[in-house]
Amino acid sequence: MNAPLQTQRFGSGHSVRRVEDPALVQGQGRYTDDVAPAGQVFVRFVRSTAAHANLVSVDVAAARAMPGVLAVYTGADLQAAGVKPIAVAPAFRRPDGRPMATAPRRALALDRVRYVGEAVAMVVAESREAARAAGDAVLIEYHELPAVVDALSALKPGAPLLSDAPDNVSAEMRHGDAAAVKTAFDGAAHRITLEIVNQRVAPSPMEPRSVLASWADGRLTVRLSSQMPTGVRNGLAEAIPGLSADTVRVLVGDVGGGFGMKTGIYPEDIAVAYAALQLKRPVKWQAERVEDFLTAAHGRDLVSRAEMALDAGGKVLALRIRSLANIGAYPSTTGAAIQLLIGPWVTTSIYDIPLIDLHLTAVLSNCAATGAYRGAGRPEAIYITERLFDAAARELKLDPAELRRRNMIRTDQFPYTNPMAQVYDCGQFEQMLDQGLLLADWQGFDARRHASQARGRLRGRGIATFLEWTGGNALEENVQVNVTAEGFIELTSATMAMGQGIATSYVQLAHDVFGVPIEKIRVLQGDTDRANGFGSAGSRSLFTGGAAVRVAAERTVAQGKELAAEALEAPARDIEYTAGGFSVAGTDLGIGLFELAARQSTARITVDGNAKAAAPSWPNGCHVCEVEIDPGTGAVEVVAYASVNDIGRIVSPTIVRGQVEGGAVQGIGQALSEQVVYDGSGQLLSASFMDYALPHVDGFLGFKTMFDQSVPCLTNGLGAKGVGELGTIGATPAVVNAVIDALDHAGQGRNAEKVQMPLTGERVWRALNGDYDAPLFG
Amino acid sequence: MTRMQFHLNGRSVQADAEPATLLVDLLRGPLGLTGTHVGCDTSQCGACTVLLDGAAVKSCTLLAVQVAGHEVTTVEGLAEGDTLHAVQEAFIACHGLQCGFCTPGMIMSAVGLLQANPKPSEAEIVHALDGNLCRCTGYVNIVAAVRQAADAMSGERA
């Protein structure tokens, strides 16, 4: 009876307990490996120990003869069966006009391997132990070839070649007006040049990849940990002969973190599905952590020479950036797009910079492929731009916040079209800056620096003001509502939960319309027999899928009124809906929503709703970080972090705070500790959590996080902007700028700008002693 | 194969295990307790943390036969009927989880800490959780949840 009150407590805009949590805290989650059908058998992949080699022979005879082994497959077996390599859309070109160069990425390697960890053979056995033992019995003879693991080396004449192309350029793009930029630089009062490394990192969701495939009644069912069930379904149907989208069902249960790494189809998905088709048994592969480090998509890996031209008053005239991206051995279209296109879309960020000259080359190497990782191109681009602003402020002897302010897009310039033809619908960038400076007590910094100094610590302060592009350019979503006789409302969506709490946000949005207790609203995702679409990536789910939830819910109520009118024998215009019940205005006649569903011939009311955002959303913010350095060890500690974020309208306040702060810790990880390291021969040195330094609990915990909801997005029905990647994008430059500020103040001056991520104690200690890594571009 | 007996979540159980079987594999496989997770292969991530005679241990680092005659508690053994353990309750209340994969291990480490040290300092909470990795939350709300659980549990005792 208290619908309005309930709506206030549980509806959008209010903090609620997540609907996902009761199961998860009791160990009742259903991750892929938790599902164990009777008769399941286990896969062990035999992986290349060579970074680059011709396969002389793959001898599986001994392995096939071992106890418990059902089958051993090689690349030749799969080729003979007609299994195709993963398709690469020809969206990008090489400088010579030929399509993007890449080697065919097969489920199992054929003839040649191109990075350490590439799957060469697949053992299927009755137990994990038997599969592992038989895997060890597969004999691979390699004819090793020279390997190359970084973009600069891969472009040198005589470098080992990864594909059929005459060099290791996979694809290239140039953006902007090079001649106009040159003129601007020639006449500029100030010119800044930096060499910048966005090092390769590993996304590292805590649940490694996992696949469980089974064949029954003419259909293949594949359960896996993925952000894009439909993409996996279509990829399997394309790769494996005899399958079509209709005969494949992809199911996704709980996903133990994605961060972009679980967006595409992987070779292992195809191999495991193929084995299930052959053996007619449920076939399971659970990746070990080392397999994720070796073969799951890595992120970033961009080296850049970045230049900024400014006039005497600090107005930025132009940016000129030359970047080389190491996209690995078997890049996807996405892997190239992230660096060639998505990053450039935001390079000028929130600033009114009229001219750009961006030259980006995606380079093949004997490393794992790069792909989407939280931010995907925007962290790299924003890091470069924000580093340039700090360097320019140092050059012009201006407060870095003031220099940024002088260049921000003004509120009267919207809609604003940036030099990459991207249109920002709205933004109040100075308003974010002002609030950020206040929250961080920007003016009080000198006193804190002195206090740190008195304790023998070097304190620095860094700022990043920025925006990002969200939506993945997949801006349409459908949601189906089913009101059931059993007394619950089911929302079906092709977006995918992966820990971000999207189900809770959808339930809150549906509660706004239906007014029933949130326990009566359920969200169904991760079943390609029920819903298909792009999936969840690019911070798109809420402002596309959430908008569709609202549309579908409102349409359901409208249709319900028609049905209630029939049931109650009253004109539809007299029917009112409140909190789970229809009534005839001015009477005591009424019928409950679920009772109405029970009256239907299908025992349910089914309504589809569709929403399409008109454009990407442009979340933005001001992040300010303070660090302390121990001059004896170089160890960096984040000691303060304040952020003001514009993510438009907020549906779930607790959840978005968790997204920004958890995301910021990932960005801090890139700034201070994380790095994927290959040695010169292509061996992966950072293949476990002993060697890959993920942030631990002993890092910074005292975030001050604010949201300004006064600038709703104008191009979608909710007014919401994406939130999932914002913290990661802002944190990395804010932290690094703070460390450089401390180094500068400690006497390193402009030299400090030569330091590169990750800012480990060793690197920072060397920098304090004037010892920096050699220049990249010479 | 060794026939062994131990106490699991308050009940006596019998199980068969090979000498090389890890405790986590016994729990997740034959015993069907899939709340205990495996997130790495080098004993770093802590997703497999359980209590052994009340102390938090990584079940990927113990052989199953080592727990014969001992008492093991997994995340499935914390709630009493519909009533969640105070630590579980606090993780929900403080948004101390996102994807939930590290959560059972985090909760078991926290329960182990609070059983031994009902009023931990923040430094003690951080120390107790340093063997558990989380990629989603940035740990902020996890530490807050353990603090809140400690307060709730000591309030109950008072």
Image (cartoon, coloured by chain):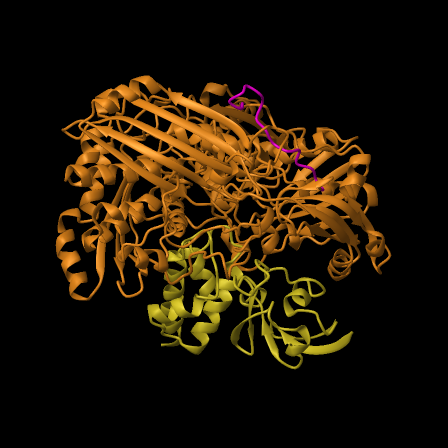
Chain colours: A orange, B yellow
* Region in magenta: A92-108
- In the picture, the quarter occupied by the N terminus of chain A is top left
* Residue closest to the eye, A15 or A496: A496
- Visible in this render: residue A596? yes
* Residue closest to the eye, A270 or A652: A270
Q: Does the segment drawn in magenta span residue B116? A: no
Judged left or right of residue A20, residue A174 is left
Residue at x 80% of width, y 54% of height:
A39
Seen from this angle, which residue lies furthest front? A158
Residue at x 81% of width, y 50% of height:
A59
* Residue closest to the eye, B99 or A731: A731
- In the picture, the quarter occupied by the C terminus of chain A is top left
Seen from this angle, which residue lies furthest bottom? B69
Q: Position of residue A342 (x, y in %)?
A: 44, 30
Q: Does the segment drawn in magenta span residue A102? A: yes
Q: Position of residue A436 (x, y in %)?
A: 22, 43
The vertical placement of A650 against A426, above or below, is below
Q: Position of residue A154 (x, y in %)?
A: 52, 38
Q: Position of residue A175 (x, y in %)?
A: 40, 22
Judged left or right of residue A653, residue B5 is right
Q: Main secondary structure of the magenta part?
A: loop
Judged left or right of residue A455, residue A123 is right
- Visible in this render: residue A707? no
- Number of numbered callouts drawn: 0
* Residue closest to the eye, A355 or B119: A355
